[in-house]
Each structure stands twice: as C-alpha cells, then as structure tokens.
Amino acid sequence: MEYSVKSGNPEKQRTACIVLGVFEPRKLTSTAEHLDSIADGFISNILRRGDLEGKLGQVLLLHNVPNGLSDRVLLVGCGKERELGDAQYHKIISTAIKTLNETGSMEAVCFLSELNVKGRDTLWKVKHAVEASEEALYSFDQLKTKSDTERRPLRKLIFNVPTRRELTEGEEGIKQGEAVARGVSLAKNLANLPGNICTPTYLADQATELAEEHDNVSVHILDEFEIKEMGMGAFIAVSQGSEQPGMLITLEYKGADDDSKPIVLVGKGITFDTGGISLKPGAAMDEMKFDMGGAASVFGTMQAVIEMELPLNLVMVIAAAENMPSSRATRPGDIVTSLSGQSIEILNTDAEGRLVLCDALTYVSKFDPDVVIDVATLTGAVIVALGHKASGLMSNHNPLAHDLLNAGDQAADKAWRLPIWDEYQEQLDSNFADMSNLGGPAAGSITAACFLSRFARKYQWAHLDIAGTAWKKGKDKGGTGKPVPLLTQYIINRSIVN
Ligand code: BES
Ligand code: MN
Ligand code: ZN
C-alpha cells in the first residue's frame, strides 16, 4: 500500500472514496458536517432514516453524494465522542480499511486521522493509522496453494490532517508507521512459519540476507560447534537433543560512530519447543512454533531501525535452537556449566529459554552495551499474571524500565513491570550446582527473570516476557508482531535524546 498525507476539504477530493467519521448517536464529525452542508443535507437525511447509529465499528457506504468529486463516501461509526481512545481509534481505522478493501476503490482519502484521540497528536494518529491499516490487510498465505484473499484494487491511502502546518508531522508519522508496520509484518511472517521450515539455520539465512541488503549492517553467525567450543554449556544443553544445529546469530547496525555504545537486543529463538525430555502435553503443542517470537520481534525491530536509518548503533543477537527429546537430549538433573562459569542443574528441560538466553546474555557483554533488552516467550506464568494484553517487564535498572513502559504506552503495545527482588532468588537454590533452572510454581515469570539477572550483572538490562502477547490463539491464530512497536518506539526515543 502507498501512504501519503494531505490537508484539504472533503468536497474537493477527486478520488474513489472518502472516509468520514460519525459519532454515536448519529452525530457527524465536523468534516462530515462540512460535506453534509455542501451536499444539501444528503448525509444527515440518511442518518435520520436510521441507517447508521455511529456505534464503534459500524459502516455505511454511500454513492452519488451530491456536489462532491469523490465516487463514494464511506461513513464509519466512531462510538461515543468522549470515549475515543487508542483502542477505539485502532478499531475505527481497521474497520474502515477492511471495508474499503471490499469496495472497488483504488484509492481513498481518509479523514479519520483528524479525529480527536485522547492525548494523541497528529504524528501519532497518522503513524498509528498506517500500522492499523497494514495490520488489517495482513494475511499469511505463502504456504497455501490458493490464496484466501483475492487481490483487491485498493492501492493508495491518503490520510488527511486538519491544517497544512501539520503536514510535516503527518509525513513523519507515515515514515515511522511504515517502518514499524514492515517490522511487524516481518516478525509475524517469521513467527507464523512452522518449525519444519523456520529452523535455526533458516533464521541465520534471513539474517545473512538482511545484512547483504544494507551496507551498514553486518552479520556474524556462530554454529553449534563454535557455540560448544566457546563454552556455552547451557545453550548446548538445549540444542544437543535436536538434529537441527543451534545458531547464535548476530546482526550489527551502525548508524553512529564506533564509540557510541550500542543498544543490544537479545531474542529467544526456540524454533520449536517440545519441552525436551520434560515433554509438554500434546494439546496445542503446535503453538510452540511461536517460541521464537522474541527472535522474530528483535528481527522486526532491526528491520524498522534500518529502514528509518536511525542515528545510533544497534546489535541484535538471536539464540536459535530447537528443544527436542532424543537419546542425546539433556536429562532432568543434568548439570552444565554456562559461559559465565556458573553451573546450572537442569531440573526441567522445558525451562529451556533461560538456558539459551543466559549464555547469550554473557556473550553480549563483548559489545560494551549501553543497555541490553532480551525478549522471550519465556513463561506460561506471565499469561496467568497479565493475560494477553501486556508483556511482562523486569529490569535491574529503574530508568530503563520506565523508558520501556513509556515507549509501550506511546506505541499502544503495553508492558507492565514485575519485581525481581532478591527475596525471590532463593527459589533457584540447588543442592548440587550454583543454581537450578527451575524456581517452582510460585512467581514463575519472576524467578525466570531472576535466573537471567544472574547473567546480566555487568550492564543495564531489561527482560520482556512476551509469552502472552507474541501470538493469538483461535480463529485468528498467528503471530502479532509484538513487541516490535514498543521496541521501535524506545529506540526512536533514544535516537532523539542522543
Ligand atoms: N516456551 C515456554 C513458555 C510458554 C508456555 C509460552 C506456554 C507460551 C505458552 C517455555 O519454554 C516453558 O516451557 N516454560 C515453562 C517453564 C517451567 C517449566 C518452569 C512454563 O512456563 O511452563
Ligand atoms: Mn519450554
Ligand atoms: Zn520455550
């Protein structure tokens, strides 16, 4: 889709469709009112007949509206004017785009970006409109022989801003929105690919491709053999049970001088999590192909940052492995030595994410990071705590935690902080090693983060547990691309401060 912004009057748009809002009950937005008066009350007449109440998500497509230049007018219900927040705005845009896509329109001028959304400016509204549109149009059919979604004519979307002074802001919104949306799509595509296609090697190939496309991006891949040689005993304990070799994949983006310390993102890339010898139950196990959602989102964020050419340095490290049971697999009770030198008793082979991540966290200190943020579908417990609405955030550094919470709020991709107080650490005590990889049933997300914190002492670190947010179940089953919007917003904010 091609996006742009303009500032103009609805009656002057020579286009296939213009999109206008109607509040509940039957209250025209000011732009709709303006067009209505030029059209001699055509729209308000129709509303009076009761065809559109203005409830959130309602739509009405009109033809032959008098005295205008557009072929069609699409009215979209916006709900109660006073209740218009992020979620409502998202729904309004998404409904509008899906409906438009069903009409024969090749292009449309959308006035919904002028709505007043609580606490949001023009940049946000345009940016979010682009993100919501791309989400509405997303489909994953690369593995279907016949596509479900026919090719539609809609090619061009123009978002209107109230005044010409806001055009620059709107253009910035398009730029950021497109970058985030492309990052989200990439993350969704990677997440949606099944475990037999999206293997650690596949992820490594994708990273290599991305690096080849950009001069300021370089790739470095450690294979299973090198990982073992380096002494990453915790990582190997996970990947050794699989035929698929594990990979530690690094992409470095240089947008600033060499002496500028990088932001480092670390992604859990378990391309399939059977649980290993601590085998998972069969129900819904297919969803464990999404256990590389952290890696996918880190990838997507890298893509967005590259596209925006942000002036900072960014490193992405993906710990990619498959967690399988086999005669070579780790047994419960096995003790391994991590890259940090600390020994770990593996009491449950299904707590594998922390094992690959802990070695990756030790590894990344070589980049002399400004901050390190790991992203992982780490614990089922975070779904118990926060459901599917927010990612769990844990950190050893309050300012970093605040910055990430703010970024999540700004990006409408929320996170909520959980504590990692020292009091929880004793749950990881082992009789036989420096620690166990299992903290027991209480506070499962917190003890998982406490485990990671023991490998992140040398730098400012945050951990995002995205087990509840990385994918959806049910009819809309699929990757969400979260938390690409949050991470990208954080990095945009950092690039402004620097
Ligand atoms: N990938 C899972 C976490 C997960 C489970 C995400 C269900 C989404 C839905 C992770 O590797 C795992 O198995 N965690 C265990 C940890 C436990 C053994 C300490 C869990 O959450 O049950
Ligand atoms: Mn697991
Ligand atoms: Zn897992």
Image: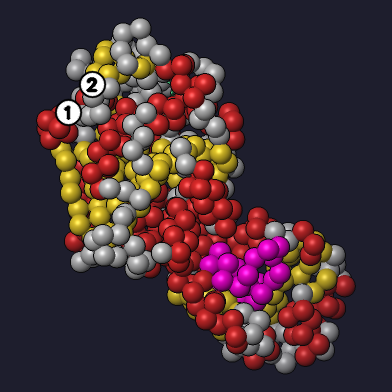
In the depicted view, which residue is nearer to us: 402 or 45? 402
In the depicted view, which residue is nearer to us: 423 or 130? 423
Q: Which residues are magenta?
A: 100-128
Q: Earlier in the sequence, mark 1 or mark 2?
A: 1
Say which residue label 2 marks. 337
Residue type at mark 1? Gly
Left or right for 493, reference 333: right
x and y, in percent, of residue 291 in the image: 38, 36
Tell me the distance, in whole angstroms, between the alpha carbons under discs 1 and 2.
Answer: 8 Å
Residue placed furthest toward the top: 431
Left or right for 97, reference 327: right
For the N terminus, the quadrant is: bottom left
Can residue 395 be seen here? The reply is yes
Q: How many marks?
A: 2
Contact? badges 1 and 2 (CB < 8 Å): yes
**Alpha-carbon neighbours of circle 2 within 10 Å: few (<14), some, or many (≥20)?**
some
Residue 33, picture quadrant: bottom right
Residue plotted at (47% across, 61% down): 493
Mark linked to residue 231: 1
Residue plotted at (53% across, 54% down): 407
Cβ of disc 1 within 8 Å of ligand 3?
no
Left or right for 217, reference 131: left
When the figure is inspected, residue 15 is found, relative to residue 355, above or below; the finding is below
x and y, in percent, of residue 299 in the image: 34, 51
Left or right for 434, reference 400: left
> Is residue 127 covered in magenta?
yes
Residue type at mark 2? Thr
Q: How is the image coloured?
A: secondary structure
For the C terminus, the quadrant is: bottom left
